[in-house]
Amino acid sequence: MKTNMNRFARKTIAVLTGLGLLAATSLAQAEGRISIAQQFGIAYLILDVVQDQKLIEKHGKAQGLDIKVDWNQISGATAMNEALLAGSLDVVSAGVPPMLTLWDRTRGKQNVKGVAALGSLPNYLLTTNPRIKTLKDFSDKDRIAVPAAGTGFQSRTLQIETAKLFGQADFKRLDSISVSLPHPDATAALIAGGSEINSHFSSAPFYYQALEGNKNVRKVLSSYDILGGPATFNVLYTTQKFHDENPKTYRAFYAALHEAAQFIRADKAKAADIFIRVQKSKLSPDFVRKVIADPENDFTVLPFRTFVYADELHKLGVLKNKASSWKDYFFEEAHAYQGS
């Protein structure tokens, strides 16, 4: 009986050891791969530089790791969030509000949090309607193009301002006239004129193009006006699982983002060339350099004024969970730096 028990114990240990080795092998295989998705526009310049200069691969090799990077381009926060939760992407990028929505929804489950900011850049609400001077002038005859109607950065920013103007109960007033449309398509519609799209909450470089391409296009307001100053536009975010199971890959990615931000500050002309090459843009180098050099645009990985969204969207009931600070919804690597 004792022999049988010993034999059983040995078999159990062998099985558990095998499972442990299998788990370790799976974890090791997971390290060294990362799939990233970005959207369109110069707001993703940091990622363009990371991709072009192969900075993730560089920082991976510094840790003795060969990293395979899969780059994707998707329009709209909804598609980003769905892909992240489905596990088809490791890291996605969108405005601060969509990231906060996913942080809120996944607390205690996938625990989605921010990796880093992609820069403090304004969005401009543009229109060709001469009657519109403020948000109060929009009617049901107008159409505002945004990448993700009702849920994306632009819509949530408008909701915050709408709540101030019309009261919290009516914060979705402009959702009914918002249309989901990628920035390039919305810009083309505004420049051409003649379509139902007569307004666009636009990011760089698209609002520069629209303002130059059609003399009837005017700026109604900036996201900086709503948020009280320079603020983070887009962020990168991922799940707790990816963060925890791929420490070397994550560190390499985070270091690559910081190096890319430094690269842009040091050589804006070269950064402009990289944007044109990676995005396959037809914009002139001089135009892109002008956008990058605009003092309103700060290509930094440090988050600024993100807590305005966390606080205001919680008041509106969009977020169920109340954050105590920006550190609640960013992974700890970002905590070593200043943020808000």
Image (cartoon, helix red, strand yellow):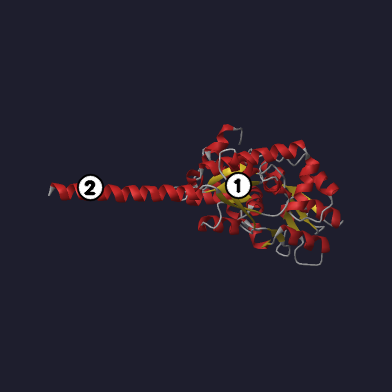
Residue 67 in view here: yes
Q: Residue furthest right?
A: 215
Picture coordinates of residue 313, whole percent (x, y): 57, 47
Residue at 66% over, 48% down: 161
Mark 1 crowdedness (10 Å alpha carbons): few <14, some 14-19, many ≥20: many
- Which quarter of the figure is the C terminus placed in? top right
Under mark 2, the amino acid is Ala
- Position of residue 152 in the picture relative to residue 200 (left or right): left
Figure check: 229 above or below 152? above
Task: Give the mark nearest the N terminus, 1 or 2.
Answer: 2
Query: Furthest residue to the left?
Result: 1
**Label 2's element?**
helix
Q: Which residue is denoted by mark 1 in the rendering?
A: 236
- Which mark is on residue 218? none
Q: Residue at x 81, y 67 (%)?
A: 194
User: Can you give x and y, in whole percent of width and height, for residue 129 in the image?
Assistant: 80, 59
How many neighbours does mark 2 have within 10 angstroms: few (below 14), some (14-19), or many (20 or more)?
few
Label annotation for residue 9: 2
